[in-house]
Amino acid sequence: MVNQPVIIMQENIGMGSNGIIGYSIFGHYKTEFDYDKNTMTLYKSDYLQIDSSWTSIPMYFKNNNIPWIDASVKIESEEPVQLSMYIDFAAGDEIVLLEKSDMKFTIPKETKEIFIGRGLSGDIYGKSGIISKLIIGPYELHNLNASFADAKVRSKQDKADAIIGNALLRKFNLIFDYSNRRLYLKQNSNFKNQVRPHE
């Protein structure tokens, strides 16, 4: 990979890593994340044939090439509501639901105040609670730990309803096909571990 553009940050923001990779690499490959083997594999598009064992989910992009999907949440006993969510591999949460004036969901009756994490903007605080269900394509995940945070603090993505984090992604093996705007999912050995307490 020659002549790759980079951004060098001037300050240590304490995220515990030496760098971030994104669309400038992933956008040129089909990228497979195998959480069972803890591997990431980049394929040139013609070299990976995706068989019927994978579930295909539409994926879309907005201003800055972050991957988005639509999925539905059921907070308690109401009907599921569809939300626009983007994927944040750096987030340790299963899902972060963004509080704003036009949010499409209600906050669970029982929540607790938590420190959500540290992002590019600094420390982020919010609430945690259990949501009844998350529906992604044919998959239903029950009794998930959800974080709730002020959209103005947690997210700079316009019209985002929620953020999918790594604790949820790791329940699947994944293939991101940016060029064809598809996300492929296959449940793995982590899939049944659906409740993870906040640390």
Image: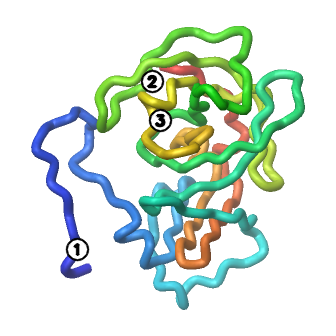
Residue at 53% across, 41% down: 165
User: In this image, 48 relative to 115: left or right?
Assistant: right
| Cα distance between the residues tagged 3 and 2 | 9 Å
Q: Position of residue 86 (x, y in %)?
A: 56, 49
Task: Name which of mark 1 and mark 2 comes first in the sequence.
Answer: 1
Q: Secondary structure at mark 2?
A: strand
- The answer to whether mark 3 and mark 2 are in CB contact below 8 A is no
Q: Amino acid at mark 2?
A: Ile
Residue at 44% across, 73% down: 27
- The tag on residue 99 is none
Instruction: Count residues near mark 2 (Cα–Cα under 10 Å), then give few for <14, some for 14-19, many for 20+.
Output: many
Mark 3 or mark 2: which is in front?
2
- Residue occupied by mark 3: 92
Q: Amino acid at mark 3?
A: Gly
Q: Amino acid at mark 1?
A: Gln
- The answer to whether mark 1 and mark 2 are in CB contact below 8 A is no
Instruction: Count residues near mark 1 (Cα–Cα under 10 Å), then give few for <14, some for 14-19, many for 20+.
Output: few
- Residue occupied by mark 1: 4
Q: Position of residue 168 (x, y in %)?
A: 60, 42
Q: How is the image coloured?
A: rainbow
Answer above or below: position of 100 versus 187. above
Mark 3 or mark 1: which is in front?
1
Instruction: Count residues near mark 3 (Cα–Cα under 10 Å), then give few for <14, some for 14-19, many for 20+.
Output: some
User: In this image, 131 relative to 97: left or right?
Assistant: right
Outermost residue, bottom direction? Answer: 46
- Residue occupied by mark 2: 116
Answer above or below: position of 199 versus 87. above
Residue at 54% across, 78% down: 179
Q: Secondary structure at mark 1?
A: loop
Answer above or below: position of 50 versus 128. below
